[in-house]
Image (cartoon, rainbow, N blue to C red):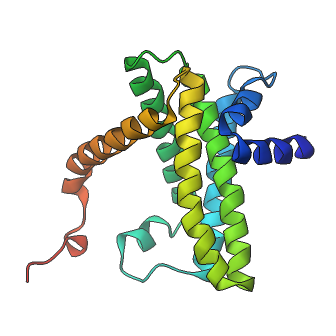
Amino acid sequence: MIGFFFSTLLLSLRDPRVGMRQIQALNRPPGTEMVALLLMAVASALLMQLSLQVLPFPGGTPFSALFASPFVTVGLQFLTLMISAFLAWLVGGWFGGRGSFADAVLAFAWLQAVMLAVQLVQLLALFTLPVLSGIIGMLAIGIFVVMLSNFVAEIHGFISPLKVFLAAVITFFAAVFVLTLIIAPFIPPEYLPREL
């Protein structure tokens, strides 16, 4: 199983759509996708907590309060992944995509697994070659964009990953706008910007 994971990981980096196809072809019982997403949320939270031990957030910021507890971090990671998968399924369906919600959950679980591997390499580089860690961090952004676009295109049967990326950007900004309107009343006054 570990060999399959690493071979599919490398395949996904070389050809994301074929890698996603290989993950979809796995013989899995119903509900496995959600379990995989939860495991990725836990793994992400553990890696984030480890990273914060090396590079902690400055005190008194919303981020330091949000990620102070590993349980809160897991909850936020899982919620973020779930919302992302839901939007990928919903918006993709609006444009004629054939992917199911389970497909979208599986795609984001695998996307998170790939990004965790990249982040782990970046964290290891931080201890050995800090300059290399910065380069890996920039590459990670590109890897994320390519993987996201191709994985969503694959599950929905879309031809153009570029169009998927553009739709993802628009969806992201729309979601941020709506979430901002929802959570703005609950932000403590000390975290709001002060007038000059």
Residue furthest left as drawn: 196
Q: Which residue is pictured at 52% across the width and 49% down the height?
A: 145
Please indicate, yes or no, whether residue 70 appears anywhere in the rendered image: no
In percent of width and height, residue 143 lies at 59, 53
Q: Which residue is pictured at 44% across the width and 24% down the height?
A: 92
Quadrant including the C terminus: bottom left
Tell which of 172 and 150 is nearer to you.
150
Please indicate, yes or no, whether residue 178 appears anywhere in the rendered image: yes
Taking 139 as reference, is 68 left or right? left
Q: Quadrant of residue 107?
A: top right
Tell which of 45 and 140 is nearer to you.
140
Taking 23 as reference, is 96 left or right? left
Q: Which residue is pictured at 53% across the width and 15% down the height?
A: 98
Q: Quadrant of residue 96?
A: top left
Q: Is residue 22 above or below residue 194?
A: above
Taking 113 as reference, is 162 left or right? left
Q: Which residue is pictured at 25% across the width and 72% down the height?
A: 191
Q: Is residue 188 above or below residue 95?
A: below
Quadrant including the N terminus: top right
The total number of labels drawn is 0
Q: Is residue 133 above or below residue 151?
A: below
Tell which of 74 and 12 is nearer to you.
12
Q: Is residue 29 above or below residue 132?
A: above
In percent of width and height, residue 18 lies at 72, 32
In percent of width and height, residue 158 lies at 52, 23
